[in-house]
């Protein structure tokens, strides 16, 4: 038997091949960490510059801050990797399946429930609604009781969730019909400006912030995947032109709905 054919003999070429495969896999696995580190680097540099150069003070609790920064780095890397592996593919696949099924109503119902469900579960919206209820109670806009604050916070969350669900229905219908997104956005913000003159002053700031907190970690990936998947599936649609824009609707409609909520609450 030739030594090269003996499985018991270790060959340099095989070792080099295994090492190359291992290094490629390690590099692939480390890519999310590298990308997250590059994304966080400007924030770290800005904080360090103002703390050490401008304020000329040592960084407090440096050990805890470094540990927290490491956790943020790992969490961000895992989150981005999870989006790429799960949320984006499933959103595009479901959009494709609904279009292939050819039932418009089921597609619109799916879009509404997707927007409503992801927004209700949005951590940023939960936090801002609870804070808004606390401030409203301290400002005597509502009764300063736990029941009143819970009712106000839940009502605010459901209002924003309904707004996002409605926004996705309009956005999906826009992709199906091929309507230009800019006209709908301009018309929507024109409505926001008009409602600002009639809404209670206490609700205007909350309404504007509600439009921002909806476009956060849970909602954005699935909404973007839905739009891109629809644009990929429907003949004559360009994913670059028609696939994006749903998130803009998800930011716009909560302002209108929350101001209406404040007017009728």
Image (cartoon, helix red, strand yellow):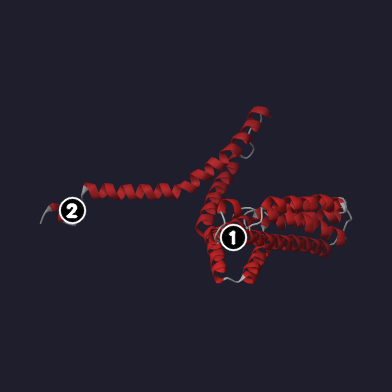
Residue at 75%, 56% in the rendered image:
254
Tell me: 177 left or right of 12.
right
Tell me: 52 left or right of 159.
left
* Mark 1 neighbour class, 10 Å CA radius: few under 14, some 14 to 19, many 20 or more: many
* Mark 2 neighbour class, 10 Å CA radius: few under 14, some 14 to 19, many 20 or more: few
Q: Reading the chain from its start, which is encountered first: label 2 or label 1?
A: 2
Give the total number of marks visible in the rendering: 2
Coordinates of residue 165 in the picture (x, y in percent): 69, 63
Report how far apart the C-alphas of labels 2 and 1 lie in the structure: 54 Å
Tell me: 234 left or right of 167.
left
Quadrant placement of the N terminus: bottom left
- Asked if marks 2 and 1 touch (Cβ < 8 Å), the reply is no
Residue 111 is marked as none
Residue at 36%, 47% in the rendered image:
23
Question: In this rendering, is residue 189 above or below 53?
Answer: below
Which residue occupies the foreground of this view, 67 or 247? Answer: 247
Residue at 67%, 65% in the rendered image:
112
Coordinates of residue 58 in the picture (x, y in percent): 63, 32
Which residue occupies the foreground of this view, 217 or 37? Answer: 217
Quadrant placement of the C terminus: bottom right
Residue at the disc numbered 1: 226
Asked which secondary structure carries label 1, the reply is: helix
Coordinates of residue 223 in the picture (x, y in percent): 62, 58
Q: Quadrant of residue 63?
A: top right
Coordinates of residue 67 in the picture (x, y in percent): 56, 45
Residue at the disc numbered 2: 9
């Amino acid at each position: 038997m030739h030594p090269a054919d003996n499985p018991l003999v270790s060959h340099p070429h095989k070792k080099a091949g295994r090492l190359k495969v291992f290094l490629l896999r390690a590099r692939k696995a480390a890519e999310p960490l590298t990308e997250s580190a590059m994304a966080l680097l400007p924030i770290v540099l800005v904080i360090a510059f103002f703390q050490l150069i401008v304020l000329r003070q040592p960084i407090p609790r440096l050990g805890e801050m470094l540990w927290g920064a490491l956790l943020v780095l790992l969490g961000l890397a895992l989150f981005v990797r999870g989006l790429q592996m799960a949320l984006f593919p499933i959103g595009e696949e479901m959009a494709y399946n609904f279009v292939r099924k050819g039932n418009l109503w089921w597609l619109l119902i799916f879009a509404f429930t997707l927007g409503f469900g992801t927004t209700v579960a949005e951590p940023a919206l939960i936090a801002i609604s609870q804070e808004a209820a606390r401030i409203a109670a301290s400002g005597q806009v509502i009764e300063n009781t736990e029941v009143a604050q819970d009712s106000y916070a839940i009502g605010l969350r459901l209002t924003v969730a309904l707004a996002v669900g409605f926004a996705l229905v309009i956005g999906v219908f826009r992709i199906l019909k091929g309507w230009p997104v800019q006209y709908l956005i301009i018309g929507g913000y024109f409505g926001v400006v008009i409602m600002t003159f009639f809404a209670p002053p206490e609700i205007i700031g909350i309404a504007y912030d509600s439009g921002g907190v909806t476009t956060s970690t849970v909602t954005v990936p699935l909404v973007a995947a839905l739009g891109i998947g629809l644009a990929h599936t429907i003949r004559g649609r360009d994913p670059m032109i028609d696939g994006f824009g749903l998130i803009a609707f998800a930011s716009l409609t909560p302002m209108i709905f929350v101001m209406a909520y404040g007017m009728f609450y």
